[in-house]
Amino acid sequence: MSFQSSVGGLVTGLGPVHKSRDSLWIGWLGVTLNKFGEEEREEILERLASVGLSPVFLSEEDVENYYNGFCNETIWPLFHYFPEFTVYNKDYWDSYVRVNRAFCEAIVENAHPEDVIWIHDYHLMLLPKLVRDQLPDATIGFFLHIPFPSFEVFHLLPWRNEIVKGLLGADLIGFHTYDYVRYFLTSVRRILGLEHTLGQLTLENRLVRVETFPMGIEYEKFAGIERDPKVQREIRNIRKKVGERKIILSIDRLDYTKGIPQRLEAFDTFLTNHPEYRQKVTLVMVAVPSRTEIESYIMLKRQVDELVGRINGTHGTIGWVPVWYLYRSLPFYTLVSLYRVADVALVTPLRDGMNLISKEFIATKTDGKGVLILSEMTGAAKELSEAIIVNPNNREEIAEAIREALEMSEEEQIERNRSMQSRLRRYDIVRWVNEFMEGLDNIKSLQKELNAKILTHDDRKKIIEDYVKSTNRLILLDYDGTLIPFAPRPQDAKPDEEILNLLRTLVQDSKNEVILISGRERGTLESWFGSLNVGLTAEHGVWVKDKTKPWEIIKPLKNDWKKAIRPYLELYTDRTPGSFIEEKEFSLVWHYRKTDPEMGAMNVRQLKDDLLHVAASLNLGVLEGNKVIEIKNAGIDKGLATSHWLSKRNWDFIVAIGDDLTDEDTFAALPEHAYTIKVGLGPSRAKYHLKSVGDVRSLLKELAKR
């Protein structure tokens, strides 16, 4: 029984990393479960364990539906922008879920609390959440080695919600390029309504970071390979077959994303447009067999065979075959020998997550000679900008790039390649791994920092102890997002009996002063809480009401500015379906919670920019809250209202709870001894965090019992 590494960039890139670290690689064997008896299975487990590998056995049905099906007929074509090849099959999806669960079981069985779990690629996009559900405190990274598509393509997938939620189980999600990061964050916003701050997402009880990590190669291995006698011997053999002709090299798996037919057609165009290069150049085309049982790959093989035959038949002569076509895998030494001897590398995928072949080719060019022609649709094009960058769909452009490459001076070749080599040497596979691991450490440290602020049992005990022994207590409570889940419309946000009873119990204690400090207008608060003996603050501090006393304005205000501001809000309301304007006595509010998340996020930025120019001249403030923009007189906020309540008495116990940016003014206005609590994670002036509205109610119930 023998074992062989699979073909592909992931294994090529991570193989050296796995060998250099104390790690366990959990993966699929590449063959089905029914191929082995019990004794053979035990032997496989034992032999693989000796080299840090652990297999997940898959049935023939799962290989067909999961690997050939969902992975390679659904995700692969869709994420590479080939929706016409994409199959949406419920049986495929069910198998994908089942196999991801099998991998989860294997991880949970082997994982220790201090382990880092690094999940790779599109085959396992549900796995981060599955592991998170089983190991909530685990350190989990995920890296996608293929492109992540734009939302317009991604939302074609019926199971897009499950995929996004699955990926967000990780602490750190990595992509090759910023474009893929941007597309993913857009999908998160459009599907789940979650906004990010510099690639950082705040989930209900956890932070997730999304970053760019362009994958490197084992640079020195390729740069030093020319000294190997096997390589030198192989180069001599290749030269003997090709003679003094220029060599153009094309190496790919035979996959429709690689643009092989388009590349052949471009070479045909080059020979037609430049007959002077006939018999002077040979295209060595290596096509590694891949997914040979899938119909689209069978058709591609037939198309490539026909194109090669046509080109050789049209342009070939006795003694010269324009395309030297190799449909097979090549040993490593033959591969690097081809890199080393080639004058031009033609790397023109229609879409590629990174493409390590282009980097390997450049690394072997120790004398600096050789030209890389690279598709702009590869992740590598962002790093290898000194290559000749082409549109892989433009046959004429590729043909012209071939001519330019063949005629480029050695001085220019060396100058271009030295720049790329310097970059690739610095950012090699080791640095890629280290940067990802550092990123994972950083997000875990930030999570721990925030989790350290989450109200613990001991913190609750201390709050209750201070509450019990105090005689003058000020309890400041935001409403939306704090006492109830946030809802933009008043009719959706009425207090339930539980919260009303809680407030009644708290105010019955004569030592307590309970203040609701809200952004809602005073009429709404009056109708909801007027019968309770609570203090009220409306419109983010514009109005205050001390128990049974009438409302009073915090300071003289004007509202004649509304005529100048309203047209801006109306314009953006028309542009943004689902948004609406709320008018309060001394403020205007633009709500966009019910809009398309992407459109709302884009338009609110534009609206805020427009408003800031006008607001400054009118002495107005533009306040951004939870899916709202509020315009009001400058200098009015919850902090000013908090100061009003603070001045009433010498309070020996203060607690303030809120959930959004407007509540930061409340926290900032309070003395050091106050207990300040933010609902949800994320940076805050508050000393403590609670995870949810339910946790707030639980704390208030504990206080109400005393």
Image: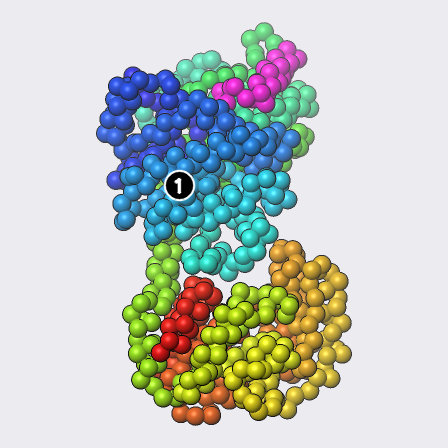
> What secondary structure do most residues of the magenta stretch adopt?
helix
Residue 490 x, y percent position in the rendering: 63, 70
Image quarter in which the N terminus is found:
top left
Between 429 and 233, which is closer to the camera in this rendering?
Answer: 429
Between 226 and 585, which is closer to the camera in this rendering?
Answer: 585
What colour-coding does the image apply? Answer: rainbow
Q: Is residue 519 left or right of residue 648?
A: right
Q: Quadrant of residue 84?
A: top right
Residue 406 vertical placement versus 632 (above, below):
above
Residue 191 x, y percent position in the rendering: 58, 50
Q: Quadrant of residue 554?
A: bottom right
Residue 6 visible? The answer is no
Between 325 and 319, which is closer to the camera in this rendering?
Answer: 325
The residue drawn where x is 73% and y is 70% is 568
The residue drawn where x is 34% and y is 76% is 463
**Circle 1 residue:** 119
The residue drawn where x is 67% and y is 78% is 584
The boundaries of the magenta stretch are 289-314
Dot 1: element: strand
Q: Is residue 295 magenta?
A: yes
Amino acid under disc 1:
Ile
Residue 49 visible? The answer is yes
Q: Is residue 671 left or right of residue 642?
A: left
